[in-house]
Amino acid sequence: NRLLGNEEKAAGLEFTLNGPTLKFNQATRIALTGADMQATLDGNPVPGYTAIAIQPGQTLKLGKVVGEGARAYLAIAGGIQCSPYLGSRSTFTLGQFGGHGGRALRTGDVLHFSPDNGTDSDLEVPETLKPSLNNQWTLRVIYGPHGAPDFFTDDDMAMFFSTDWQVHYNSSRTGVRLVGPKPGWARSDGGEAGMHPSNIHDNAYAVGTVDFTGDMPVILGPDGPSLGGFVCPATVILADRWKLGQLKAGDTLRFEAISLADADALAAEQDACVAALSAPEQQVSPAPITTPILNRLSESDAGVEVVYRAAGDRYLLVEYGPLVLDLRLRFRAHALMLWLQEQQLDGVIELTPGIRSLQIHFDPRQLPRTELLETLAQAEHALQQQDDLEVPSRIVHIPLSWDDEACHQAIEKYMQSVRKDAPWCPSNLEFIRRINGLDSIDDVKKILFSARYVVMGLGDVYLGAPVATPYDPRHRLVTTKYNPARTWTAENSVGIGGAYLCVYGMEGPGGYQFVGRTLQMWNRYRQTEAFDQPWLLRFFDQIRFYEVSHEELNQIRRDFPKGQYPIRIEETTFSQKDYQQFLDDNQQDITTFTDARNQAFDEELQRWVASGQINFQSEQDLDADNSAESVAGTPVESPVAGNIWKLNVAEGDSVNAGDVVAVLESMKMEIEISAPESGQVVAINRQEGQQINAGQAIMVLD
């Protein structure tokens, strides 16, 4: 955009691994950056990082990535015309909104662009400013928000920063999965947050944070979840986030911790270099691994202990009290959010509450970090005077298809492509029964349909998805989360992780144990009686489920977004004082239930430890040798590292040039592999489910 004189937020195109063929119907100018996709204009090579004039009728063709990097970017003078959605022109394919129809581009699509204003047409990017692409990366990070000694050991952190992590083939804009050693962990479990020591009470995630989903780290990308229940030991700095888009399967990377001051300086220099098209000069040194905690207030100072954690160079995580599920801590985070909204501080971009925390997304250029910390400390002296907070609440009755077929499908995919021996497979419900010490799956069902689930957070695994816990602690079923997480979950599946229930807002990854599926939490484009905004639920709403069949739910899901299926909503309030009285009145029964549940939890945990199932060592065998590769003939090679998702042919079959002979799964995409010429399949080198590296032969043709 800078090369073409466009506004900074003008819409362009992003290509992953493969590029399109584009025909221009009117004159314009373009600029192409990123990975090399062998771009040609009417058959002539197109240089990158410079403005190129386009005449009507010319055709720009991009192929597969050659060499390093995973993505290329195309800007068009004036920008591509598309209506903003929630303030952005980006396409969020998982959420099916934004950009051009909320999806990836297809053959035949017509994109309109704005008039070319003709400014800055002779600009070029100096060599020293062009990003250096390779397959061995260094990602500079800020230590935190979580670290040693609370969650990891010192040895874990030394391992984390000294390891050459490998990028897993199942990576995407959602997150970059990494293969490497597992931590030793500073805790045996996550308590009510879940059985694995990586489990915590849900808090907001920073973009670029390294999220340990069990023993597997995932760098959360721009399409990643905004809330979740896993620890994050480091966060990629703003100036290095561009590198996440160029990581591809098989690449290796190291994390390097730097100081917050250096991260701020690098971000400022990057902005200045783009504005002036000048070379960066800033040099920074690694920072010592000390603590991710920036400040702490004692219980005597603030009425409850408050911990301030660095979550990268653009986020601050405020945590309240001990690592327990306590609605009073959620009220305290809510009070801080309301207080900050009233202050209207310049530089505060977004406020996202968790179970016992509040994440503050801020711009340190407008609001210096030290000033923000001072303001937050002042806020606590005012907030501790509020011993009774009452907030609006609604009881929202929604249907649930118990043990739905979509849940079975997700479990089957997980067992096929992620982990076959998980103790929660093949039945999540049996696992929930066992870990909570219940006599039957029907007991699980009775508790779920009796409970009122209080919405503690929104955006847990995307799109207004609620993270909720039962009002009555006697209804709190505790589970652990998948380790590692699933790569696929059907939209609006309902699961339990730790002591929390989540309704998945959209199709995507996930880790909660399935109980069923319900109707939509998000309405993309329509306003109905239930949807006066895109998301259905609000903080402190209370969810009640009633049972419907799989077939009934399918019809409900067709009708509800159109406003043709009414749901019952009761207006009420939620009082901190009344809730505490409820707990006091029922304390004996609550203690009896909790003790029995905890005993079953501990027994299951010991079985896991004894069997070795508590941990999972992620592996990726991309370089496996295969003797069949010595067979003479024309190899059909994989263009990228990935997994053989489907073989369309068998040995002895005849194929024509261009026939799709296999489908790869890589970077969360299905990539079709075509026969380079006609012939007969004389050898199959990889079977379905096997991994393969770029350049290795899937099969051989004669």
Image (cartoon, rainbow, N blue to C red):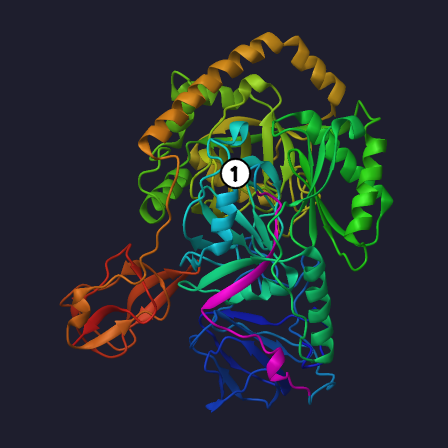
Q: Is residue 626 magenta?
A: no
Quadrant of residue 148 in the image? top right
Task: Please give the name of the residue rendered at 51% of the width and 86% of the height, measured from the top-left corner.
Answer: 59
Q: Is residue 569 visible?
A: no
Q: Residue at x 42, y 45 (%)?
A: 182
How far across and how far down the image is residue 507, in percent?
49, 48
Identify the image quadrant of the N terminus.
Answer: bottom right
Task: Look at label 1 and name its amino acid.
Answer: Ile
Q: 10 Å neighbourhood of mark 1: few (<14), some, or many (≥20)?
A: some
Residue 473 seen: yes
**In the rendered image of this protein, does residue 87 appear above or below residue 187?**
below
Estimate the x, y position of residue 587 in percent, counting from the top left.
62, 10
Indicate whether residue 125 is drawn in magenta. yes
Residue 117 picture quarter: bottom right
For the residue pair 334 and 362, the one nearer the viewer reads as 362
Question: As rendered, which of 547 and 424 lies closer to the eye?
Answer: 424
- Provide the residue span drawn in magenta: 123-147
Residue at x 34%, y 55% (from the top left corner): 620
In this rendered view, identify the residue nearer to me: 319 or 256: 256
Which image quarter holds the C terminus?
A: bottom left
x, y percentage for residue 623? 29, 63
SS for callout 1? helix
Which percent across, then down, holds residue 218? Answer: 49, 51
Instruction: From the viewer's side, name the closer residue of 182 and 524.
Output: 182
State how many labels appear: 1
Q: Is residue 77 above or below residue 594?
A: below
In the displayed structure, 594 sits above or below 80; it is above
Q: Quadrant of residue 667?
A: bottom left
Q: Quickly name the residue at label 1.
A: 556
